[in-house]
Amino acid sequence: MVIIGCSSDNKDEMYGSGYIVVSEQTWSKNYTTPYPFTVPEGEIACASNPAFGREVYFHPKGYTDESYIGTPLNKSAVDGLKLGRLTSNVPYNIKKGADLNEAVQIGLRVCYEQEDSLADN
């Protein structure tokens, strides 16, 4: 199940935000790579940024409100943070040597679903 966040009409801001809850307990039932995060539960979030494309982040459970900047999982997210002179302010939460490819694909899928939903309106 994907829960979608709100969107903005301002093209200078990220839009098409959405997220999916993931947990260590259920990861192996749904995905093929080992669970890549050091915390047992969190959200993989995606937002479309006109300047960099789709940005994917991980937010540990308890660090998901707007005052927190998640851990960037793809190059677009890293570039977006650099441009905004921002840094992640959630506890470090990626396992050493973790394969993030599947986590990034999950986040991108959230963006695609949100974009499709917005296009249908």
Image (cartoon, rainbow, N blue to C red):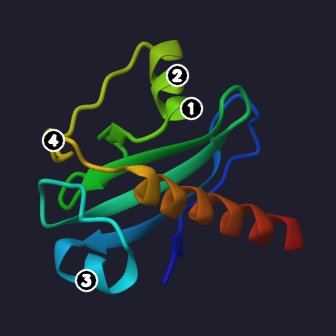
Tags 3 and 2 touching, CB below 8 Å: no
Query: Which residue does the image show at 29% across and 30% down from the upper left?
Result: 88
Disc ID at residue 96: 4
Density class for disc 2 (Cα within 10 Å; few <14, some 14-19, many ≥20) is: some
- Vertical placement of 103 versus 72: above or below? below
Disc ID at residue 26: 3
- Vertical placement of 49 versus 120: above or below? above
Disc ID at residue 67: none
Density class for disc 4 (Cα within 10 Å; few <14, some 14-19, many ≥20) is: few
Tags 4 and 2 touching, CB below 8 Å: no
Cα gap from disc 3 to disc 2, whole angstroms: 31 Å
Q: As shown in the figure, which amino acid type bears the numbered disc 1?
A: Ser
Instruction: Please identify the quarter of the rendering in which residue 108 is found.
Output: bottom right
Tell me the mark number nearer the camera, choosing from 1 and 4. Answer: 4
Query: Which residue does the image show at 87% across and 74% down from the upper left?
Result: 120
Judging by the rendered image, the residue that carries numbered circle 1 is 76
Tags 2 and 1 touching, CB below 8 Å: yes
Q: As shown in the figure, which amino acid type bears the numbered disc 4?
A: Lys
